Image (spheres, rainbow, N blue to C red):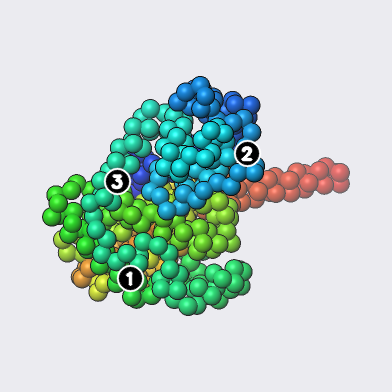
Amino acid sequence: MFTNAPSKALNFFEFPSLLLTMSSGDRRDAAAATGEVKNGIVSGELSQRQLQPAGVVAPNQNQRLRLNPNKDHKPESYEDLQLDFSPSIFSSLERYLPPTMLGANRDEKVKFMREILLKYLPQGERTRALRHREYRQKIISNYQPLHRELYTMHPANFFVAPFLKAIGDNTEDSFRSIISEPSPGVFTFEMLQPRFCELVLAEVESFEKWVNESNFRIMRPNTMNKYGAVLDDFGLETMLDKLMESFIRPLSKVFFLEVGGSTLDSHHGFVVEYGKDRDVDLGFHVDDSEVTLNVCLGKQFTGGELFFRGTRCEKHVNTGSQAEEIFDYSHVPGRAVLHRGRHRHGARATTSGHRVNLLLWCRSSVFREMKRYQKDFSNWCGECFREKKERQRLSIAATKSELLRRDAESTT
Ligand SMILES: [Zn+2]
């Protein structure tokens, strides 16, 4: 059944731009923008896109960015703001502000830096970024959160104690003590407290009620789910960023180092809903992520198992599965599954009840950049690995027969 994955399988990768690219793409460009300013000229990726040097894009002649950072200046924190670039980019860029701007208030600095950063995007992406920002602002200024305690990270209230301890100890042994790996590359562990799950479910319900009552048209989480909501769009972005940085990245650094696990730097966080009057199942696909966290929040349901069929690179996404790659997983509320985004999977029909899962697609801009220059992914793609082994086998066989031939020649 899975030797020819349905064409739907590629949707997340082929059409992510409709809904998903803003957070990853924009941040990638912005990261390059802060890292590559040399002598007022921006090199590398940016100049390929025919963008202007940093000094020129500033609004007026007296407001150019500095050529060298002011190392004595202590940048402000931008963590609490809903920005279209990562708060750390603003903090880094602040040291390059023109001397007259350094003493300005934070809002003025944000406005100035944002204008610069947006100029680094091609027009299409820039328009999309602006629209998405407006969309988010409209939601955030109109929707009243139900449980405000969800919007900032409170580890002791969110996570179960063994998970917190393992992350705190931060060693492979401590992780292994709470995590099981029932199939290669699929990790599962107890993660969320029941009360936290209930609060998120209630918050999502409240958000959807607001959507219905206000007739607000929301974007769904991805191209394959008709139901569910993007948590980042109604204010949970900062909390989910903390979740990725402090809890998922330490795990990924150990278990998914070869797909950028240690450099995860942006995320797409959402919930999906299955059951009667919701999505029923989810076709075979790969995620637009390096690492995916999938946690069941509840409620009561039957069915809805996840099925896994091995990790594949873009070129091999539709190849068959090996017996050892076939694995089914039944969701348990509070329990998390962590896997590579390129690990092919789908969800079987939720046959009764109502199931809600929280998804966090974690991305690494560094990994995506490096991937463009690589052809062999045998350290994570099952098929690249199989091909490599086969090449080695053939080469050994050829050497053997050559040696045998020489042997035979010398004895005659
Ligand atoms: Zn491959």
Residue occupying the point 63% across, 26% down: 39
Q: Is 37 rendered above or below residue 337? A: above
Describe residue 40's horizontal placement relative to residue 13 as left or right. Answer: right
Residue drawn at the location 45% of the way across and 74% of the way down: 156
Residue type at numbered disc 3 = Gln
* Mark number displayed over residue 147: none
Give the mark, 3 or 1, whose residue is nearer the N terminus. 3
Q: Residues within 10 Å of mark 3 (few under 14, many from 20)?
A: some
Q: What mark, if any, has residue 70 been given in the picture? A: 2
Residue 197 circle label: 1
Q: Quadrant of residue 292 in the image?
A: bottom left
Q: Nearer the viewer, mark 2 or mark 3?
A: 2
* Label 1 Cα crowd, 10 Å radius (few <14 / some 14-19 / many 20+): many
The amino acid beneath tag 1 is Cys
Q: Is residue 346 left or right of residue 341?
A: left
Quarter assignment of residue 334: bottom left
User: In front: 349, or 1?
Assistant: 349
User: Real-space Cα distance between discs 3 and 1?
Assistant: 26 Å
Element on which disc 2 rests: loop
Q: Position of residue 91 (x, y in %)?
A: 53, 45
Q: Earlier in the sequence, mark 2 or mark 1?
A: 2
Residue placed farthest to the bottom in the image?
161
Q: Residue at x 50, y 51 (%)?
A: 77
Residue type pointed to by label 2: Asn
Pointer 3 residue: 137
Percent from the top left, x then y, of residue 60?
A: 47, 23
Secondary element at image label 3 = helix
Alpha-carbon span between mark 2 and mark 3: 33 Å
